[in-house]
Amino acid sequence: MSGPRDVAAGRRPVIAGLGLTDVGKVYGRSAQQFAADAVRLAVADAGLQMSDVDGLLTSSGVTRGVAMSLQRDLGLTDLALLSEMQAFGATAGAMVQMAALAVQSGTASVVACVFADDPLKEGKTAGSAYGTRRAPSGWGGLMGASGYAGPNPLYALAARRHMQTYGTTTEQLGAVAVAQRDWAVLNPLAQLRTPMTLADHAGSRWVVDPFRKLDCCLVSNGGAAVLVTTAERAADLARPPVHVHGWGQAHPGRLLKHSEDFGLVTGAVASGAKAFAMAGLTVQDVDVAELYDCYTYTVVVSLEDYGFCAKGEGGPFAASGALGPEGTLKLNTGGGQLSSYYLWGMTPLTEAVIQARGEAGERQADAHDIVLVSGNGGILDHHSTLILSPHPVSGGAA
Amino acid sequence: MVGPLDRDGDTAPFLDGTARGEFLLRRCPQGHWSEPAASTCTACGSVELSWAASTGDARLVSWAVTHGRPDGDTPPPRHVLAVVELDEGPWWWTSLVAADPEALSPGIPLRVEFARAAEQYEAVPVFRPV
Ligand SMILES: [Zn+2]
């Protein structure tokens, strides 16, 4: 693979702008309006003009509300790159990868990558936002008729298999939720900032056993965008560039099929290995990890798959006190999707950029030289990995 | 127990099977079994798949328990969703009947049966511990 080290230093990709709208129970804006707001914020953050943007990659959430007509809404003309992208929770990372390839090849010079969603409708419960649509026919309809609605039961089945195979416990899952809440308490962007305990986790209602309410991510309205450009272009922009050192994707393609790995090993193994190889780094080099956490279990299995602990040891690792602001591994430092906000893969990506810049305030990790970002989509079936740093990629081509 | 279901072109042959009490799988000329929704053989890539009846015997791979809303003093209704492995190999995402969630463990034997939400709807496979 040709990564940033294979191109001239000036052409290497960086994230130069970040835009995050108000998130959570924010009403009166459509997904497409959130997306436009997020791009405008990212452009202003970078100290650029909208007319500097010549690439636009869009990603929609559950409402499928962001279209390529966002170009028109933003007044963008004569783009060199424009596409909708979809790899579910892996899309944010995949968009940055596409943008990085575009800027280092010269296909485009400033690429906006944006996600927005508006699943929450005023006066309706969060539960009605996801998973209650049932197809009355087709294979999807057959799953619906069999009792399946939305992703919760599918992830619960994966988690049960992990628990049965490795002895992972609900208390260990609870430790993930508590650690991330401790981070969210420090994060003014987070939706849930009231401290919680393992007893709160154990007392929260079952959603689908083995998941309690506090094992499951939030539902949020909002939008987020990043601007990707070259190191050369970013040198005189407003904000410190966040350099993209490596990336990878993996799509195992065994969704709902017989898979010995189901629930036990995910595409993060292959996606992570590719990203570390490109960056010339290993998991030991990671200072801050922002891992997709649609459920507490997703964190446990991802910790194993990236190599932060041995396979099957994710639960004991989480319960050991390794996580949280006082822990040894700075993981999901904004509170993640469980406690901060749920913008699919933009949740880990936005927090990673904030941490890499050293602008996370009370929750800033002291060491933030290497920041890992993991996206996960479908039912553990789509993965993307980014390795980010405030420092330029060293070595390689002149 | 099961929800309403109509057929479409993709599922019609499978639902013809459930209507007569058979759980159909796809089979290639070499005899590999694939799941009902497969259009390519999982083992050899053949696209010449035909329908063939499974024995309907399966083993439990994983399960999850949904909890309905409590109604007065009645405990909330529980429903067991499951991944099962047919004896022929393919997996199926289904629900269990007459299953005590506390008595489940990976590998326990199951057998298919069929249920309809109402007479006008298609028969849906469910599995019962044996
Ligand atoms: Zn075959």
Image (cartoon, helix red, strand yellow):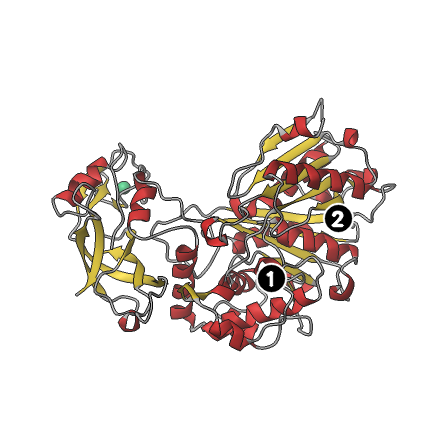
What chain does badge 1 belong to?
Answer: A
- Amino acid type shown at disc 2: His
> The N terminus of chain A lies in which quarter of the figure?
top right
Classify residue A51 by image quadrant: top right
Query: Could you say where residue B89 lies in the image, as x and y percent from the top left?
Result: 26, 53
What chain does badge 2 belong to?
Answer: A
Query: Could you say where residue B40 lies in the image, as x and y percent from the top left?
Result: 32, 38
Dot placed on the residue nearer the N-terminal end, 1 or 2 = 2
Q: Nearer the viewer, residue B125 or B30?
A: B125
Q: Image height check: is A334 above or below B24?
A: below
Classify residue A97 by image quadrant: top right
Q: Image height check: is A260 above or below B107?
A: above
Secondary element type, mark 1: helix
For label 2, being within 8 Å of ligand 1 is answered no
Which residue does the numbered mark 1 point to in the structure image? Answer: A339
Which residue does the numbered mark 2 point to in the structure image? Answer: A243
Task: Give the number of the mark in front: 1 or 2.
Answer: 1
Q: Where on the image, by quarter, is ligand 1?
A: top left
Mark 1 and mark 2 in contact? Answer it, CB < 8 Å: no
- Amino acid type shown at disc 1: Ser
